[in-house]
């Protein structure tokens, strides 16, 4: 079946000129500028997957009744293409994103795109727009595959009968700006939850984010960078930070170990999270999963047991957490600065992605 999915190449005759692109790549921000092309592929009940193409980047024309605009039947992924120092352009574990995209589709009652077609779509777009992959190792090409329900009908008796899959690409720098790697401050969400058992927290659907912005605004109003989500039932167990998973570092030096909350069904199973769980033991850092409550987080920091905390995700890689604030006050991780274990893991992961270090798990996927 999946062998039948093909992408026609309709290249743009209005590509951004080299000099303009170079200027755009100077400081692209995150997710603000886009490459010359995009991938689109349609699905309908009668025809299955069809009309796959690489085409010039541009607006989508949608009927105002289009289902996604009303009921948010949407899923997405996020991964990056890296220009390695020795020349090749690679991605990191794209088959893991493809598998998660299929799981997201199943949860949202959408058709599952065969995983090889997902990876091929990315390869075609990155190959076509390779000049947009930054040369700087503080930047990469962020890839955003997504799928929306396109049926123009307001009835909610059943899922939509037509969908659009697309991939767009955005040369991007750091998510959290500042000089070098900055420790972020986090706010313990009050009065809001991100996800509940049986809900959609474990899949990447836009609605999770739509529901998170009020809490994120609350965090900003409190002078914090990000919101930390707690469990829906007791509002006590730590789940995630914004759109990233969290790790707690216990001890230091050769005694350091790391722990992350287990995937209870309301956490998003991050590919970065999974990679760190496997990578840390390679570096002699034991890693495991264990629930942690807000009180335990605070008390273990006070006792000096927890020495560092970091968040992880594709976009911001590994980001140190420096301070926590909540209605009951706040506390600091160590001296509030990026910690050694955090930075060691960050260097290791980036080293593999940019080809400076060996790739013992075969995670790097060469595109060209
Ligand atoms: C995407 C995402 C993550 C991180 O997943 P990665 O695969 O590591 O990029 C974590 N939490 C949420 C809510 C997310 O949407």
Image (spheres, grey):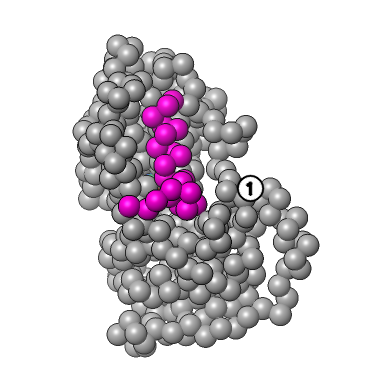
User: Which residue corresponds to the image point at 52% horizontal and 63% vertical from the top-left?
Assistant: 88
Q: Nearer the viewer, residue 14 or 158?
A: 14
Q: Which residue is mark 1?
A: 29
Quarter location, residue 47: bottom left
Q: Position of residue 26 (x, y in %)?
A: 71, 50
Q: In the image, what residue occupies the spot 30% across and 11% down?
A: 303
Check if residue 136 falls in the magenta segment: no
Q: Which residues are magenta?
A: 339-360
**Residue 220 in sight:** no
Q: In the image, residue 13 lies at what x, y percent? A: 71, 80
For residue 264, what is the image quadrant?
A: top left
Residue 334 visible somewhere in the drawing? yes
Label 1 SS: loop
Residue at the location (27% across, 23% down)? 255
Q: Extreme right residue here?
A: 19
Residue nearest the viewer, comparing 141 with 211: 141
CA neighbours of label 1 inside 10 A, class few (<14), some (14 to 19), many (20+): some
Q: Which residue is located at x 66 percent, y 51 percent?
A: 28
Residue 108 position (above or below residue 158): above
The front one of 245 and 215 is 245
Residue 352, magenta (yes or no): yes
Q: In the picture shown, does residue 328 fall above or below 264?
A: above
How many badges with numbers are in the image?
Answer: 1
Say whether mark 1 is within 8 Å of ligand 1. Answer: no
Horizontal and vertical percent position of residue 320: 45, 31
Q: Is residue 238 above or below residue 60?
A: above
**Quick one: quadrant of the N terminus?**
bottom left
Q: Residue 130, how many percent across, how many down?
A: 59, 67
């Amino acid at each position: 079946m999946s062998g039948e999915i093909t992408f026609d190449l309709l290249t743009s005759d209005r590509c951004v000129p080299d000099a303009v692109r170079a200027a755009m790549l100077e400081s692209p921000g995150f997710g603000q500028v886009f490459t010359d092309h995009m991938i689109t592929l349609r699905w309908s009940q009668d025809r299955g997957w069809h009309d796959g193409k690489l085409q010039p980047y541009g607006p989508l024309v949608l009927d105002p009744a289009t289902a996604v605009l009303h009921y948010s039947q949407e899923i997405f992924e996020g991964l990056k293409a890296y220009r390695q120092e020795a020349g090749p352009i690679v991605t990191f574990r794209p088959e893991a994103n493809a598998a998660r995209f299929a799981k997201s589709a199943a949860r949202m009652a959408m058709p599952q795109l065969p995983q090889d077609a997902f990876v091929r779509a990315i390869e075609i777009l990155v190959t076509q727009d390779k000049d947009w992959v930054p040369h700087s190792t503080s930047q990469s090409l962020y890839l955003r595959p997504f799928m929306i329900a396109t049926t123009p009908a307001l009835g909610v008796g059943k899922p939509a009968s037509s969908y659009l899959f697309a991939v767009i690409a955005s040369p991007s720098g750091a998510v959290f700006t500042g000089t070098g790697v900055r420790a972020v401050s986090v706010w313990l969400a009050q009065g809001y939850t991100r996800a509940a058992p049986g809900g959609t927290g474990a899949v990447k659907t836009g609605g999770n984010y739509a529901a998170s912005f009020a809490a994120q605004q609350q965090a900003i109003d409190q002078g914090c960078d990000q919101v930390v989500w707690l469990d829906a039932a007791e509002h006590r167990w730590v789940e995630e930070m914004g759109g990233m998973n969290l790790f707690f570092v216990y001890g230091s030096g050769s005694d350091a170990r790391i722990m992350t909350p287990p995937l209870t069904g309301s956490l998003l199973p991050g590919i970065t999270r999974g990679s760190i769980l496997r990578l840390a033991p390679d570096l002699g850092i034991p890693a495991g999963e264990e629930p942690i409550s807000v009180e335990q987080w605070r008390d273990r920091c006070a006792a000096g047991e927890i020495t560092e905390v970091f968040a992880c995700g594709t976009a911001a890689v590994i980001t140190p957490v420096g301070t926590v604030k909540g209605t009951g006050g706040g506390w600091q991780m160590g001296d509030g600065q990026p910690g050694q274990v955090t930075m060691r893991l960050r260097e290791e992961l980036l080293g593999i992605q940019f080809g400076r270090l060996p790739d013992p798990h075969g995670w790097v996927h060469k595109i060209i």
